[in-house]
Image (cartoon, rainbow, N blue to C red):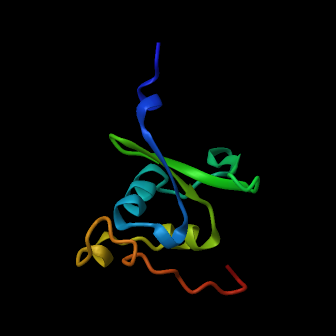
Amino acid sequence: MKNRNDNLKRVIVDFKKLTPEILALLVERYPDGYDEDQIISFRNQHNEIIEAVEVTTADTKYLVKVSTKLAITMENYDEDDYEDFDNNDPEAVQPPEVTDED
């Protein structure tokens, strides 16, 4: 028996390509942030180890690369910040300022 997720399109998302829609899904799925046991590790086509967290829509499974920028952006998420942007606009989600303390 095939799993419903077998037919989903799979997309790896770097912070630079993060959209308001995917960010909202991440915050909904991981409201308190993600834990080490929720991170998926795999090798990409260049044999580099990638760490990501997963969110799924009706037709797509997103693997969003884990980074300090992602954690800070999720922590400071406010959907009102994105109301003037299209849900699929990768320019909408800007990188936070990362200091040595983060």
- The correct choice, above or below, for 64 with respect to 20 in the image is above
Residue at x 73%, y 56% (from the top left corner): 46
Between residue 93 and residue 100, name the one nearer to us: 93
User: How many badges with numbers are in the image?
Assistant: 0
Residue placed farthest to the front in the image? 45
- The correct choice, above or below, for 30 with respect to 101 in the image is above
Residue at x 36%, y 45% (from the top left corner): 57
Give the left or right position of residue 40, taking residue 49 as reference.
left
Residue placed farthest to the top in the image? 1
Residue at x 46%, y 56% (from the top left corner): 31
Between residue 45 and residue 10, name the one nearer to us: 45
Q: Position of residue 26 (x, y in %)?
A: 45, 56
Residue placed farthest to the left in the image? 84
Q: Quadrant of the C terminus?
A: bottom right
Where is residue 58, by image quadrant?
Answer: top left
Q: Position of residue 41 (x, y in %)?
A: 70, 48
Q: Position of residue 35 (x, y in %)?
A: 64, 52
- The correct choice, above or below, for 2 with respect to 26 in the image is above
Residue at x 67%, y 44% (from the top left corner): 37
Give the left or right position of residue 24, taking residue 71 as reference.
left
Q: Position of residue 78 (x, y in %)?
A: 36, 72
Give the left or right position of residue 72, taking residue 87 as reference.
right
Give the left or right position of residue 58, taking residue 15 as reference.
left
